[in-house]
């Protein structure tokens, strides 16, 4: 078995989803796992590129654009960090910081990225470097910024907060981790005054952003199977917070929604395996499973509303909700738009640049797409 992977702390092996394709989970000799061909259909949604901007070189799961008001912040592995106007794509500032491993997080005043050596780098509102602080190990998911802290999750399963003004360490939390973990689209979020993070152990943590106190911890899934590969059950994508409801999705596990106002009791669960996570609106959760069948589940009770198999095995990105559509990117650089109501295909647009691995970002003006070759695009719908 050939694995494209790295070793951290002598225990944690970070596996890319591409590597898993050679591990028997997606056998290349079995045509069941071939990507579905694109078919012709009558488009019912007008989609177009509103603007496109080069933001550096490269891309990947570890990089996601972030929006604060009319500001878009983006970073690439080449070291470029860029602030753009959401309305026009005009560059407001740009910094070149050397090779980066993850980015970007911002609250509009402090923008943070992480270098390949685990150095956390913070920039001010003008793109001028403020400070550098060392994480406990390498970092492979974007940092989050808010409530006066910059928070990173490192590959030794430690969540660390640094003071946003000075870079001084504020708090850190560590949980035991499995031998193997996925390298895929994973994000933390800050909601009000808490940091919410999934872990490779299949757990969700809700942490006070200012003190580091763990307010709640719950299990999305538990590892099963005889081998380390079979026991992978990372919480993937970003947690979904909708009022008192908190939801998480895991690989080889479940989608679960909890009521954190009622002690974190599970409201519902669905057996599910996602490689890239979910998104949602006030009524439904949307996620592609391990085979890239897209599902909608009712947020209230978890019942299946619809499923769409037309994009089978097309290596879909984390989805985004935009107007009446759910958007997903695929391995050929297409953005597909599905109906939120019943899942039928509404339209598609090829943006190029290789596989879409960064999560799609919904904004009031359209969907932000970061391509694998270092471009950022805003796709509008009408």
Image (tube, rainbow, N blue to C red):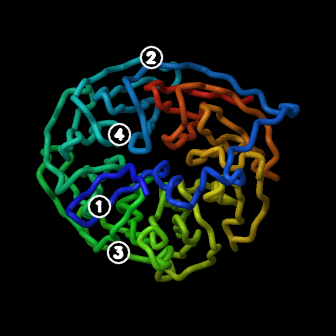
Query: Which numbered circle lies on residue 300?
Result: none
Q: Nearer the viewer, residue 127 or 229?
A: 229
Left or right: 377, with 29 as reference point: left
Q: Which residue is mark 4?
A: 104
Measure the alpha-carbon separation of dots 4 and 2.
18 Å
- Residue position for label 2: 90
- Corner quadrant of residue 11: bottom left
Which quadrant of the figure has residue 99?
top left
Task: Report the quarter where the N terminus lies.
Answer: bottom left
Q: Earlier in the sequence, mark 4 or mark 1?
A: 4
| Residue under numbered circle 1 | 209
Circles 3 and 2: CB atoms closer than 8 Å: no
Cα–Cα gap, marks 4 and 1 = 18 Å
Q: Are marks 1 and 2 in contact (CB under 8 Å)?
A: no
- Residue 257 image offset from top left, x and y in percent: 57, 71
x then y, percent, for residue 308: 77, 53
Q: Nearer the viewer, residue 22 or 303?
A: 22
Near-viewer residue (220 or 215): 220
Q: Reading the chain from its start, which is encountered first: label 4 or label 2?
A: 2
Callout 1: SS: loop
First reached walking from the N terminus: tag 3 or tag 1? 1
Q: Residue at x 52, y 64 (%)?
A: 251
Question: 10 Å neighbourhood of mark 1: few (<14), some, or many (≥20)?
Answer: many
Q: Is residue 220 above or below residue 105?
A: below
The residue that disc 3 covers is: 215
For the view shown, which residue lies furthest in the right direction? 42
Separation of marks 3 and 2 at Cα, in angstroms: 41 Å
Element at label 3 = strand
Residue 349 in percent (x, y) is at 69, 28
Residue depicted at x 61% and y 39% = 329
Report how far apart the C-alphas of labels 3 and 4 lie in the structure: 26 Å
């Amino acid at each position: 078995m050939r694995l494209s992977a790295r070793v951290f702390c002598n225990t944690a092996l970070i596996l890319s989803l591409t590597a898993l394709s050679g591990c028997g989970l997606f056998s290349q000799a079995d045509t069941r796992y071939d990507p579905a061909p694109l078919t012709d259909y009558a488009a019912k949604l007008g989609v177009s590129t509103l603007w496109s901007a080069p933001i550096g070189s490269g891309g990947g799961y570890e990089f996601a654009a972030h929006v604060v008001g009319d500001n878009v912040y983006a970073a690439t592995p080449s070291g470029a960090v860029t602030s753009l106007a959401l309305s026009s794509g005009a560059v407001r500032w740009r910094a070149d910081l050397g090779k980066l491993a993850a980015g970007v997080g911002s609250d509009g005043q402090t923008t943070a990225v992480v270098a390949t050596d685990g150095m956390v780098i913070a920039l001010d509102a003008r793109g001028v470097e403020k400070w550098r602080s060392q994480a406990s190990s390498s970092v492979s998911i974007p940092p989050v910024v808010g409530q006066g802290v910059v928070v990173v999750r490192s590959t030794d399963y430690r969540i660390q907060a640094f003071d946003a003004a000075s870079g001084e360490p504020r708090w850190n939390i560590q949980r035991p981790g499995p031998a193997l973990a996925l390298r895929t689209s994973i994000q933390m979020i800050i909601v009000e005054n808490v940091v919410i993070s999934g872990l490779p152990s299949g757990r969700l943590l809700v942490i006070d952003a200012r003190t580091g106190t763990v307010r709640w911890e719950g299990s999305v899934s538990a590892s099963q199977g005889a081998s380390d590969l079979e026991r992978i059950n990372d919480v993937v994508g970003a947690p979904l917070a909708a009022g008192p409801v908190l939801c998480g999705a895991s690989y080889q596990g479940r989608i679960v929604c909890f009521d954190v106002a009622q002690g974190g009791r599970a409201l519902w669960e669905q057996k599910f395996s996602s490689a890239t996570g979910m998104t949602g609106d006030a009524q439904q959760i949307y996620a592609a499973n391990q085979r890239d069948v897209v599902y909608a589940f009712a947020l209230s009770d978890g019942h299946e509303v619809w499923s769409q198999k037309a994009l089978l095995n097309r290596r879909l990105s984390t989805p985004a909700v935009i107007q009446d559509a759910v958007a997903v990117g695929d391995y050929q650089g297409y953005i597909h738009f599905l109906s939120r109501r019943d899942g039928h295909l509404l339209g598609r647009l090829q943006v190029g640049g290789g596989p879409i691995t960064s999560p799609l970002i919904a904004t009031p003006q359209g969907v932000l797409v970061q391509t694998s070759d270092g471009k950022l695009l805003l796709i509008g719908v009408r």
